[in-house]
Amino acid sequence: MLGRILIIGLVVIVGLWLIRKAISNRGREAEPGGDSRRGHQAKLIACAHCHARLPATDAVWKDGQAYCSMTHRHLGPKG
């Protein structure tokens, strides 16, 4: 009886872990320029406003352009 409870508990824990991992990976796939695989360097891009270089995964995106912050996103590209 105790062995059966332990096996069911283990199956539930593994199932919840797999669901959590699948949900977190789904969000990474939607990031432009993002690389969801560990051990790979993120592609560096320039902010459309101040031209600071930052990883594409950390950028704030609007209309296909990357920005280093929400403030620069609101200010838009610098001419």
Image: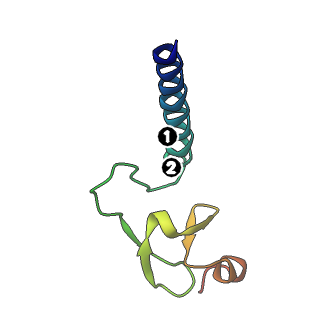
Coordinates of residue 6 in the picture (x, y in percent): 49, 23
Give above or below for 65 relative to 16: below
Coordinates of residue 58 in the picture (x, y in percent): 50, 68
Callout 1 amino acid: Lys
Q: Are marks 2 and 1 in contact (CB under 8 Å)?
A: no
Residue found farthest to the front: 1
Q: Mark 1 falls on what kind of element? A: helix
Where is the C terminus found, in terms of image quarters? bottom right
| Residue at image location 47% in from the left, 63% down from the top | 57
Coordinates of residue 49 in the picture (x, y in percent): 57, 83
Q: Mark 2 falls on what kind of element? A: helix
Q: Quadrant of residue 70?
A: bottom right
Left or right placement of residue 24 versus residue 36 in this view: right
Give above or below for 14 relative to 26: above
Callout 2 amino acid: Arg
Residue 21, which numbered label?
Answer: 1
Between 30 and 4, the residue placed more toward the observer is: 4
Crowding at dot 2, Cα within 10 Å, few <14 / some 14-19 / many 20+, comes out as some
Between 36 and 19, the residue placed more toward the observer is: 19
| Residue at image location 47% in from the left, 26% down from the top | 10
Residue found farthest to the left: 39
Residue found farthest to the right: 74
| Residue at image location 72% in from the left, 78% down from the top | 74
Coordinates of residue 47 in the picture (x, y in percent): 51, 78
- Which of discs 2 and 1 lies nearer the camera? The answer is 1
Q: Earlier in the sequence, mark 2 or mark 1?
A: 1
Measure how far apart labels 2 and 1 are at the Cα level. Answer: 11 Å
Between 19 and 76, the residue placed more toward the observer is: 19
Which residue is the site of mark 2?
28
Labels in figure, total: 2
Residue 36, which numbered label?
Answer: none
